[in-house]
Amino acid sequence: MSALKEQLHADLTTSMKARDALRTSTLRMALTAITNAEVSGKEVRELSDDDIVTVLGAEAKKRREAATAFAEGNRPELAEKETAEAAILAEYLPAQLSADEIAVIVTAAVDEAGAAGQGMKAMGKVMGIVSPQVKGKADGGTVAAEVKRQLGA
């Protein structure tokens, strides 16, 4: 079992003993999502820590989007719950990159790909270089927006 999954199980046990309902339900949801990812596909496989970070990142993104939707729908109590769940999941994710850090990485990738002045034709090439560097550390939409900005779209 991966170290991150063991940590999630240990934290779940601790939160259950402490009777922390929100943390317990959030960690159960995260472990269920990990198990679903492990059994999806043709054969069962053990996820690595990187794969688990990807799953947790997707779950955290769902919570942030749901919180936004609830806030816009005038449901502040549900938005608050979703925000709290996203914060719990964020504890297990790597620190997120700032906009300035993303811009530096994209600039380096544009130079490396020789994509300056090529416009949107080079987006795939640049994203291919940037994506592995920011995986789990930045939202894909934010990165894509910065790439488009730098390519002059």
Image (cartoon, rainbow, N blue to C red):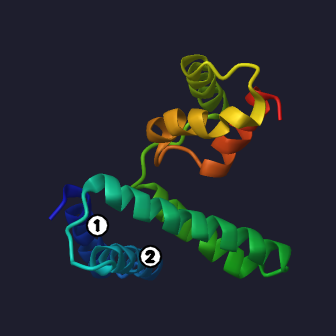
Determine which of the numbered discs, if any, sits on residue 56 in the image: none
Query: Is 27 in front, or is 37?
Result: 37
In screen coordinates, is 135 left or right of 100? left
Q: Residue 90: x percent and y percent? A: 48, 56
* SS for dot 1: helix
In percent of width and height, residue 100 lies at 65, 27
- Answer whether labels 1 and 2 touch (C-beta < 8 Å): no
Distance (Cα) linking label 1 and label 2:
10 Å
Q: Is residue 80 left or right of residue 54?
A: right
What is the quadrant of the C terminus in the image? top right
Mark sitting earlier along the chain (1/2): 1
In the image, what residue occupies the spot 84% across and 73% down? 72
The amino acid type of the residue labelled 2 equals Thr
**Which residue is painted at 34% across and 61% down in the image?**
52
Q: Position of residue 129 (x, y in %)?
A: 50, 33
Q: Position of residue 109 (x, y in %)?
A: 56, 25
Is 108 placed above or below 101 here?
Answer: above
Question: Could you tell me which quadrant the N terminus lies in?
Answer: bottom left
In the image, residue 130 above or below residue 51: above
Residue 142 sits above or below residue 91 on the image: above
Callout 2 secondary element: helix
**Residue behind mark 1:** 8
Q: Which residue is mark 2?
A: 26
**Residue located 76% across and 20% down the image:** 117
**Dot 1: within a 10 Å radius of its alpha carbon, few (fewer than 14), some, or many (20 or more) residues?**
some
Q: Is residue 83 left or right of residue 91?
A: right
Q: Name the kind of residue labelled 1 in the image.
A: Leu
